[in-house]
Image (tube, grey):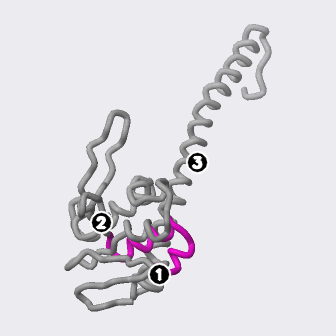
């Protein structure tokens, strides 16, 4: 339900999902509250995910925006916490609120639940095909990361196997030379 191009108000589960005045950014904090999400589903938990960080980096590049990075605590990696015009955090009435472009809000809605995702696809974004492409890109990136991790593990396993096989072959050759016989490899 859109009120006007300047200010939009959406309703999800009988709760108002606001946008940030003048920017068109949608409150993903409102989505989380309407979904009655757990702490594990809050906007910052979603932002910290590797797939979300990859998406945010691509969006920053696409929009030509400089992301704001967190200051890492001991042992933590820095993460993108906001991107002007794409993902913003504001403080209103002593509470933090996170706003995102509609396409990013759809990606967050998918993180929350299937019902919220369906609602967001049909309500927040007028160009559903673009949103589906964005979601597909996020999912493809997550699969690529998973694939790279598996390849890395295989290379590590191979890295351990090669010296062991070489040691066995060299030991066989040395034994064959001492006894005066030849090994099948010669």
State the mark number for residue 150: 3
**Quarter of the image where the N terminus is located:** bottom left
| Image spot of residue 79 (x, y percent) | 33, 50
Mark 1, residues whose alpha carbon is within 10 Å: few (<14), some, or many (≥20)? many
Query: What residue would you read off at disc 1?
Result: 121
Rounded to the nearest angstrom, the CA distance separating label 1 from label 3 is 32 Å
Q: Which element type, helix, strand or loop, lies under badge 2?
A: strand
Q: Nearer the viewer, mark 2 or mark 3?
A: 2
Whichever of callouts 2 and 3 sits on the residue coming sooner in the sequence is 2
Q: Position of residue 155 (x, y in %)?
A: 57, 40
35 sits to left or right of 4:
right
Residue 100, position in %: x, y? 32, 70
- Please check the rendered image and state whether residue 114 is part of the magenta-colored stretch, yes or no: yes
Q: Position of residue 178 (x, y in %)?
A: 74, 8
Mark 1 vs 3, N-terminal side: 1
Q: CA distance from mark 2 to mark 3?
A: 31 Å
Residue beneath the point at 45% across and 71% down: 34
Helix, strand or loop at label 3? It is: helix
Magenta range: 100-121
Specify the principal SS of the magenta part: helix
């Amino acid at each position: 339900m859109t009120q006007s191009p300047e200010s939009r108000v959406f309703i999800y589960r009988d709760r108002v999902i606001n946008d940030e005045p003048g920017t068109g950014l949608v409150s993903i904090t409102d989505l989380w509250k309407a979904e009655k999400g757990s702490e594990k589903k809050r906007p910052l938990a979603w932002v910290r995910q590797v797939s979300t960080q990859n998406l945010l980096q691509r969006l920053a590049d696409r929009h030509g925006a400089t992301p704001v990075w967190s200051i890492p605590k001991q042992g933590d990696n820095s993460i993108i916490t906001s991107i002007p015009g794409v993902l913003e955090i504001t403080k209103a009435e002593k509470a933090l609120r996170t706003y995102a472009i509609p396409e990013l809000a759809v990606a967050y809605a998918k993180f929350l639940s299937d019902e919220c995702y369906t609602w967001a696809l049909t309500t927040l974004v007028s160009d559903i095909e673009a949103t589906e492409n964005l979601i597909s890109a996020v999912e493809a990136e997550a699969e690529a990361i998973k694939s790279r991790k598996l390849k890395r593990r295989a290379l590590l396993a191979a890295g351990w196997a090669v010296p062991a096989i070489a040691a066995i072959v060299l030991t066989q050759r040395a034994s064959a030379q001492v006894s005066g016989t030849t090994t099948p490899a010669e």
